Image: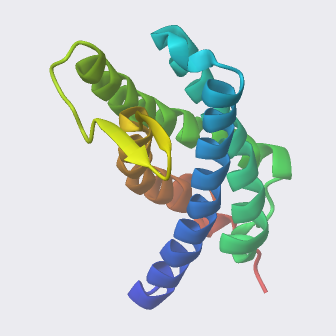
């Protein structure tokens, strides 16, 4: 059984990988919405977010497989681990996207404002959708870590020595 210190260190690694996923997620989302102009509609925002989450799932799997859980790769083939990671991540994505969509609906209908319009170094705009994205990411992190710890890279898969 893995001790508390080992789980804590693994969670820190998972968090670092997740942090890189946040950069990928928000970077792709920003590019699609601001660079390609897809922020003009709720559908454009949602499609942009779905694509950015999927790309971050792929990059997070690779980093977690080769770093965070390298000692737990065991006998299961790469494709099996990837499929498990993807299933866990899709549930996490539903949590993430649910929070994001709900908050954006509340913002779009005037029921909620997180920060509102900003003026920053000559830029004027609203970043409430970016904050909603961050809150969705935070909401999914605990599910993703524990789901992957107990299923994708479960201890029973560790190679015997």
Q: Nearer the viewer, residue 155 or 144?
A: 144
Q: Residue furthest left?
A: 111
Residue 158 appearing in the image = no
Is the residue 47 above or below the residue 118 in the image? Answer: above
Q: Nearer the viewer, residue 59 or 146?
A: 59
Colouring: rainbow
Query: Which quadrant of the view contains residue 154?
Result: bottom right
The quadrant the C terminus occupies is bottom right
Residue 147 appearing in the image = yes
What residue sits 68% from the left and 64% below the top? Answer: 157
Residue 139 in percent (x, y) is at 35, 47
Q: Is residue 147 left or right of residue 117?
A: right
What residue sits 84% from the left and 52% below the top? Answer: 77
Is the residue 8 above or below the residue 125 in the image? Answer: below
What residue sits 57% from the left and 59% below the top? Answer: 18
What residue sits 59% from the left and 36% below the top? Answer: 87
Residue 121 in percent (x, y) is at 49, 53
Q: Nearer the viewer, residue 6 or 150?
A: 6
Q: Is residue 16 left or right of residue 62?
A: left
Residue 33 in percent (x, y) is at 61, 26
Q: Residue furthest front?
A: 122
Query: Which quadrant of the view contains residue 133?
Result: top left
Q: Number of numbered discs present? A: 0
Q: Nearer the viewer, residue 119 or 12?
A: 119
Query: Which quadrant of the view contains residue 75?
Result: bottom right
Is the residue 14 above or below the residue 118 in the image? Answer: below
Residue 20 in percent (x, y) is at 64, 60
């Amino acid at each position: 059984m893995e001790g508390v210190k080992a789980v804590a260190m693994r969670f820190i690694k998972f968090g670092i990988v997740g942090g890189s996923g946040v950069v990928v997620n928000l970077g792709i989302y920003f590019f699609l919405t601001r660079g390609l102009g897809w922020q003009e509609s709720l559908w454009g925002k949602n499609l942009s977010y779905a694509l950015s989450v999927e790309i971050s799932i792929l990059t997070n799997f690779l980093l977690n497989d080769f770093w965070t859980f390298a000692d737990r790769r065991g006998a299961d083939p790469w494709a099996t681990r990837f499929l498990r990671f993807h299933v866990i991540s899709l549930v996490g994505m539903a949590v993430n996207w649910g929070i994001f969509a709900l908050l954006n609906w509340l913002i779009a209908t005037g029921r909620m404002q997180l920060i509102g319009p900003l003026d920053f170094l000559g830029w004027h705009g609203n970043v409430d959708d970016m904050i909603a994205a961050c809150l969705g990411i935070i909401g999914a992190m605990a599910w993703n870590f524990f789901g992957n710890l107990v299923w994708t890279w479960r201890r029973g898969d560790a190679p015997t020595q």
